[in-house]
């Protein structure tokens, strides 16, 4: 059987305090209750930036501007592979309320606190890059 390949985009969103937005996956999703960079799957024929803006609207009811790509990695999960790209983003309205439409929870997290949250394995490279940027 051929493995499933999934294209995934995630948002790196920083607030004016320098904290990053992370969201918690629902208890019923795959990788339940893990924390991640908000985003999701890119649909067939969809542009990454369009997919990312759509996902944040669907998951949290916020509008974003998608800026440059900061990371690209591949990761093999037991039953599928992901091609994962992270883009630096900006909230269109920095005071916008974050709704938990399809996320279980959210946090604005300082870099030194990231280690307290459990992320999917595919996020190791992004987290390392983030900590690197800090030095
Ligand atoms: N958004 C996001 N997904 C991640 C991260 N790290 C990571 O391994 N993933 C994986 C988890 C999932 O297998 C996949 C994203 O798919 P998803 O199920 O959240 O996507 P979706 O919202 O489009 O969900 P669905 O419509 O397919 O149910 O990427 C991350 O930091 N952010």
Image (spheres, rainbow, N blue to C red):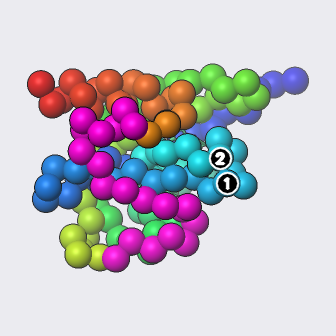
Q: Kindly identify which residue carries mark 1.
A: 27
| Residue 105 x, y percent position in the rendering | 49, 61
Which of these two is toward me, 49 or 97?
97
Determine which of the numbered discs, if any, sits on residue 17 in the image.
Answer: none
Q: Kindly identify which residue carries mark 2.
A: 32
Residue drawn at (29%, 49%) of the image: 109
Is residue 110 rendered to the left or right of residue 46? left
- Tell me whether circle 2 and circle 1 mark residues in contact (CB < 8 Å): yes
Q: Secondary structure at mark 1?
A: loop
Which quadrant: the C terminus? top left
* Magenta segment: 97-116
Q: How many marks?
A: 2
Residue drawn at (62%, 56%) of the image: 26
| Residue 130 x, y percent position in the rendering | 26, 32
Q: Secondary structure at mark 2?
A: loop
Q: Crowding at label 2, few (<14), some or many (≥20) Cα neighbours within 10 Å? A: few
Label whose residue precedes the other's in the sequence (2 or 1): 1
Q: Is mark 1 within 8 Å of ligand 1?
A: no
| Residue 118 x, y percent position in the rendering | 49, 37
Residue drawn at (32%, 24%) of the image: 128
Which of these two is toward me, 93 or 16?
16
Q: Is residue 12 above or below residue 74?
A: below
Q: Is residue 100 above or below residue 34?
A: below
Which of these two is toward me, 120 or 66?
120
Is residue 24 rendered to the left or right of residue 3? left
| Residue 121 x, y percent position in the rendering | 54, 27
Q: Is residue 109 magenta?
A: yes
């Amino acid at each position: 059987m051929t493995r499933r390949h999934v294209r995934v985009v995630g948002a790196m969103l920083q607030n004016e305090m320098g904290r990053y937005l992370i969201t918690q996956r629902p208890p019923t999703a795959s990788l339940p209750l893990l924390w991640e960079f908000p985003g999701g799957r890119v649909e067939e024929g969809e542009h990454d930036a369009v997919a990312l803006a759509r996902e944040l609207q669907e998951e949290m009811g916020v509008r974003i501007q998608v800026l440059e790509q900061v990371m690209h990695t591949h990761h093999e999960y037991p039953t599928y592979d992901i091609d994962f790209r992270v883009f630096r983003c900006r909230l269109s309205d920095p005071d916008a309320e974050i709704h938990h439409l399809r996320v279980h929870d959210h946090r604005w997290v300082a870099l030194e606190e990231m280690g307290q949250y459990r992320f999917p394995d595919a996020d190791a490279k992004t987290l390392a890059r983030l900590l690197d940027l800090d030095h």
